[in-house]
Image: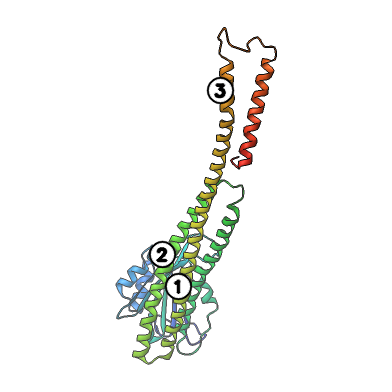
Amino acid sequence: MIRAVSMISNEQPDWQKNPESVWVDVLSPTPEEIDELKRVFTLNPLALEDALTEGQWSRFEYYREHAFLVYRTLKTNGKCNDDTERVSLFWYPETDTLVTLRLREVGYLNEVWQTFEPVTHGIEERVIYNLLSRGADNFFDFTDALKEETDTLEESMFQHQNSQNLIKQVFHYKHLIMTARRLVSSARESVAAFSRHSSLIGEETNRNTTEELALYLRDIVDLLSRTYESLDSSREVLTSVLDVNLTVQSNKMNEVMKTLTTVSTIFLPLTFLAGVWGMNFEHMPELKWPLGYVFAWLSFLVLGVGLAWYFRKRGWW
C-alpha cells in the first residue's frame, strides 16, 4: 500500500508526476509498487534491499541519492515484552521529500500521519523528528513497565513465593533487557550518525531547518542514552534481586540444617543410653530394679530437655 501527503498544502499530491515536497508512506509493498517507487524516486539499491529485509537493526547511511535510516524500536503497547517495530526512511533534503517504508504496521508512524499538518518549507525535518522521538518514547514506556515489574519482584522476594518461579522471572526480564539494550544502542548510534550528517547537509545547502534537525536529533540521542542507562540500572536491580534471593535461600537452608543438627545432637546421648540399657548381658546392674524403666525415661527427658535449653540459651537453635 502506498499513500502520499503534500508537505506544503492540503491538496492530494500527484507524487508520480511531481515527487517533490511530499511524504510518501509505503506499507508491505508489492513488487509492482516497488517498481513504481523506483520509477519515481532514485532509490539506492543497497538501501532498498536493507529496507525490504526482515530483521534489520537500526543503521544510518548517507548515499549519493539520499540519506537512509533504518529505525527499529520496541512496539507501541507500553508492555514489557520484546515485540519490535521498524521503519526505513529515505530523505531527499534537496526536494523536501520523505519516503517511509515499513513491512508491518508501525503504531507511532500512523499517529504522526494522522496528526500531520502541512506548513511551509522544511516540514519533512519535523516529520522525521516526530517519528524518531515517538519511537524513542516507546523505549521509555518499556523501561517504565520494566521498573514496575522489578519493583514487584523486589517486594515479593521476602514473601512466601516459589524461589524457582522468581528465578525464572528474573532471567526472563534479564533477557528482555539484553534485547532492549541492543535495540537502544543500535538506534542511538544510528540517530547520532544522522545528526552529524544533518549538520553537514545544512552547511552545504544553507538550510537552517536541517541544522535545526541536527539539534533535535541530538536531543533524541540524549533521550536514548538515558534509556540505555535506565536499562543498565534495571539489570543491576535484577542481579541484586537474584543475589539476595540466593542469600535468603541459603539462610533458610542454614536454619534447616541448624535445626536438624540440634535435634540429632539431642538424640545422640539418648541413643547411647538406650543402647547401653538395651544390652542383654546376664549380670548387668539395675536389670531387676523395679524403678529402672521409670529411671530410664526420666534420664531421657532430663537429658533431652537440658540439651534443648542449653542450645536455645546459646542461640544455636
Question: Which one is in front in this view, the residue at disc 2 or the one at disc 1?
Answer: 1
- Residue 239 percent across, percent down from the top left: 48, 57
Picture layout, residue 10 above or below residue 281: below
Q: Which residue is mark 2?
A: 182
Q: Are marks 1 and 3 in contact (CB under 8 Å)?
A: no
Q: Which residue is mark 1?
A: 225
Mark 2 Cα within 10 Å, few/some/many (few <14, many 20+)? some
Q: Secondary structure at mark 1?
A: helix
Query: On the picture, is 88 further left or further right than 240?
Result: left
Question: Which one is in front in this view, the residue at disc 1 or the one at disc 3?
Answer: 3
Number of dots carrying numbers = 3
Picture layout, residue 115 above or below residue 230: below
State the residue at coordinates (58%, 37%).
Answer: 259
Residue type, mark 3 in image = Phe
Q: Which residue is mark 3?
A: 272
Viewer-closest of 28 and 88: 88
Residue type, mark 2 in image = Arg
What's the CA distance linking mark 2 and mark 1? 12 Å
Q: Residue placed farthest to the bottom in the image?
A: 206
